[in-house]
Image (cartoon, helix red, strand yellow):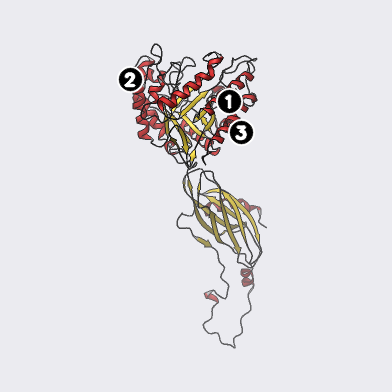
Amino acid sequence: MANDDARSQLSRRRVLAAGVAAGVPLVAGCSSESPDESPENETTDQSPETEPEPESETDEIQNATPVGTITDVTVSPRTVRQFQPAEFTVSVANEGGAVLEARVSVDIDGSFADAFDVTLPAGDATELTGQLERQRVGEHTIAVAVETYDGPVQAQQRSTITVDHYPAHQVTVDGTQLACGDGRAVYGGASLANAFAPENNRASEASLEPAFDTLADLGVSSARIWGFAPSWADISSMPGPETYNDQWFEYFDRVVVAAKKRDIRLFVPLFNGNPAYGPVGEEDLGVNVPQLVRWADDAETRNDFFESEDCMRMYKGWVERLVTHENHLTGVEYRNDPTIAMWELGNEIQHSPPRVGESIRPWIEETGAFVKELDDQTLLTTGSYGHQGRNAFVDEANADPIDVVSIHYYPGPEHYDLPEEEVIPTLESTIQTVREEIGKPLYVGEYNWGVGPEDSAPYTERAKWVSRLQRVMREGAVAATNFHTVADENRPTSFHKKATVYAPDEQETLGKIATHARLTRDLSDSECL
């Protein structure tokens, strides 16, 4: 058996073995030459009368040495998609004269992937199997080595595996529907608007995975998440004019990977508009209309944003930096990653009083064309609120670069305060307007039935109305819907946000989200879902 000192040196030997330069897959192994085959043991004159000399003690030791060889390394399939497993098989043989006790190590690109302890009698062989998966697109080198615990590497061999992006297909438009791969795709999901809430340190990796686990447990197929750090975040994505924070991009890289691993498509607003959720102070640096107006030399009011050359330059600079960013975990630029199903020009970008309701179509035409020049694969929508006089949404959605119509819908006493008898007809009328006057797929980027921030808030009432809205959207063939918003945290005891459903506390509404996600999948016939 291996002694402790030999075991302690094993990892160093394995790394050295994995460091051999990559090239044509090689079959390298140690073979043992017997004394009869060795040149120094050959005789030039060997007559029949000559007696063979008896084996020496040294020869007996050599004949009894274990010799580990790798006879084959196979990987199937040789091309896989991100996070999809490939099976490898390593064939190991002992061609020596004694029992082989060794470790077979498997590295990918010089990093440990797997290891096996083997015991092989003289002349015996075995096959070892395992699975590999990678998240970075491209070709990867698999290095396999056999090493004894008290000796050097005996054999090594290399193979390769190619990783392609996952998912395989982009989301596209087919008339008034979305399509993906081989058929219609209807997306039912939710948003993670609280992903940057500073009180919960939501920008940390530790909280990111549980947040997406919560969505995955609901069975959603899509998620809407900011493509920027909002003003309330504990991290800044754009701390100054045309200045970008690499730390934020590293965080968003993990957002994309977290969604990818769970088969969740992302709907991503590129920018934040004229926030309806309160004032934005000087210290609240965010990628939004008020902040860019502050930085611009040719703008004073929020409405100036749409005619400001400085604001347009800063907006385009941010968008280009985001859309063309290469994910450090996957090696894929965001614009080439099908996990991102749709860009939104901005979250609720619109004129402020006294110009509420005026069209911003010229701005949409220019910015939309710019995004399409950078990325002609990912779908584009406006991110507009969409109706009830806050936008000229029919005119704006008819802009040439816009693929999908965007609306948000918040009936209920904490939002529009529509009479209950008008809630369903208003939504049905909006769906009909999109179908008849625009003729593009409809995306409800946000919807909810708001409840007051008291402990006695009527959560059952919310669940009832959310279910009614979802039924209307399914019957109206709405292409994608994202409930706003789910938080993977316990509901505060004294105050909560009126548009937030807290998991796991609010099971009734969470159940409605899960049911809607399942039923929208049932409406789809695409392999993507």
Picture residue at 45% right of the left edge, 30% below the top = 441
Residue under numbered circle 2: 308
The disc, 1 or 2, on the residue closer to the chain's N-terminal end is 2
In front: mark 2 or mark 3?
A: 3
Amino acid type for the residue under numbered disc 2: Ser
Picture residue at 37% right of the left edge, 30% below the top = 401
Residue 23 placement (x, y as % from top left): 45, 56
Amino acid type for the residue under numbered disc 3: Asp
Is residue 124 left or right of 232 when viewed as pictured? right
The disc, 1 or 3, on the residue closer to the chain's N-terminal end is 3
In front: mark 1 or mark 3?
A: 3
Residue under numbered circle 3: 217
Residue under numbered circle 1: 487
One can see residue 305 in this view: yes
Q: CA distance from mark 2 to mark 3?
A: 45 Å
In the displayed structure, 121 sits above or below 413; it is: below
Q: CA distance from mark 1 to mark 3?
A: 13 Å
In the displayed structure, 350 sits above or below 518; it is: above
- The front one of 266 and 155 is 266
In the displayed structure, 498 sits above or below 436; it is: above
